[in-house]
Amino acid sequence: MQRVAVIGAGPSGLSALRAFQAKAEQGEPIPTVVCFERQSDWGGQWNATWRVGTDELGEPVHSSMYPNLWSNGPKECLELADYSFEEHFGRPIPSYPPRAVLADYIAGRARKAGVRSWIRFSSAVRMVRFDAATSTFSVTVHNLTEDAMYTETFDYLIVASGHFSVPHVPQVDGMETFRGRVLHAHDFRNASEFKGQRVLIVGRSYSAEDIGSQVWKFGAASVTISYRSAPMAFDALPPNWSQCPQLKRVDGSACHFLDGTSGEFDSIILCTGYVHHYPFLPDELRLRTPTSLYPRGLYRGVVWMRNPRVFYLGSQDQWYTFSHFDLMAWWARDVILGRIALPPQAQMEADTDAWAKRESTLVGDQQAVEFQGDHARALQRETDYPYFDTGAVDRLFVEFEHAKHQDFMGYRDLSHRSIITGTVAPAPCMPWRSKMDDSVAGFLHQHGHDR
């Protein structure tokens, strides 16, 4: 009996477990699958905490999410083909739910699949070694609750540990002299802490958009975005928002920008991204890549070409998220089960180079969405994953981006049609800017549904 190790029980890892369970459900033999999760529960990023630094087990805090985080894209773009939101909640819900609702949805499918017994919680993988003579992996695990180490052997390795947990922190001259608070987005927790403050956000991508929106919603005196390449291109921002070029130097409470302008601030929030970090892997198995839609070294975005017994799930920059994780997991499973034969090494490298070359030519969000859509379709064609219309997902992403650019603070008040069920989401009970209860119970009650 072959054995498969899955590292991480977030959305990608749970997709891997569901992929194998789907085959077992059909009566087909599957390998023994063991998932190692260093947190005490499943969910990965979505298993958020108020803690910063270390968690209750003394491990580095994994989640970069925070209270009052709401979906910054339509739930219809990430809905799972075999488990709709309508099935999970028993009725349609609005298109932009809070984090806790999405976490509940993720857990719901995992519970339905019955894969919790496949997961060893509070178990941190410390080291993986590959034995070329036996083609097996030795996985050394730290049982955090018992403070005990042990090693087990596996035939395949699936890395699903995520890549939005270890902050990229740029060096800025004089930052040590700043008189206020400096934090990375990874450690952002309570937007109300910044009420009445002049907040400088370094970065202009999704974390900057959302954290800027949060501190604005909770009463920041002003929000300034410092961008490196180009400013946010929204049609209208609130009157207390402004944008400045790259932050070059800090002197006390004064921040100086590339264009020679400066301003006084009370807090600096670094929305400067994350780095891929796999400290448990040796050099020959470790993916090294910048944030990318198609990381080099991974055939079909999944198989580690230097050792095709290693698979990475969710290592890409993401638009599709959950459904993309599923497609990659189904594809990896079929390679492991021998249903998909890998081509020769040279052919894998040529295919990967072609995707990477195409990515280098992309301009704008629409081309990026369609690129990831094409990747999803390539995986979809080769597996038995339940069909869903990826072209409709692409179009909805583009529609959403246009809506966000037209009404940056109001796009979450829109409703979209489910690509899985065809149902149009109900309108939210109040504007997003007025919503302060981000709990599952509060969200469902506000929309006429109590569990």
Image (spheres, helix red, strand yellow):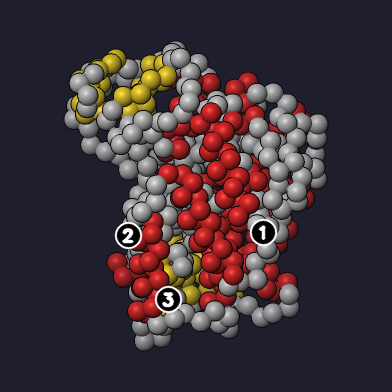
The quadrant of the picture occupied by the C terminus is: top right
Marks 1/2: CA distance?
Answer: 32 Å
Give the quarter of the image for residue 183: top left
Q: Which residue is mark 1?
A: 388
Find numbered disc 2 in the image and state the secondary structure of the residue it sits on: loop
Residue visible at 80% across and 35% down in the picture: 450
Q: Which residue is mark 3?
A: 308
Q: Are marks 3 and 2 in contact (CB under 8 Å)?
A: no
Comparing marks 3 and 1, which lies closer to the viewer? 1
Q: Nearer the viewer, residue 264 or 66?
A: 264
Find numbered disc 3 in the image and state the secondary structure of the residue it sits on: loop
The disc labelled 3 sits on which kind of residue?
Pro
Q: Mark 2 or mark 1, which is nearer the start of the sequence?
A: 2
Marks 3/1: CA distance?
Answer: 28 Å
Q: Are marks 3 and 1 in contact (CB under 8 Å)?
A: no
The label on residue 403 is: none
Give the quarter of the image for residue 245: top left
Crowding at mark 3 (Cα within 10 Å: few <14, some 14-19, many 20+): some
Would residue 255 be found to the left or right of residue 107 on screen? left
Vertical order, 128 against 259 (above or below): below
Would residue 174 be found to the left or right of residue 306 on screen? left
Q: Which residue is mark 2?
A: 288
The quadrant of the picture occupied by the N terminus is: bottom right
Vertical order, 65 against 328 (above or below): above
Would residue 349 be found to the left or right of residue 332 on screen? left
Residue visible at 50% across and 61% down in the picture: 375
Q: Mark 1 or mark 3, which is nearer the start of the sequence?
A: 3
Picture coordinates of residue 192, whole percent (x, y):
50, 21
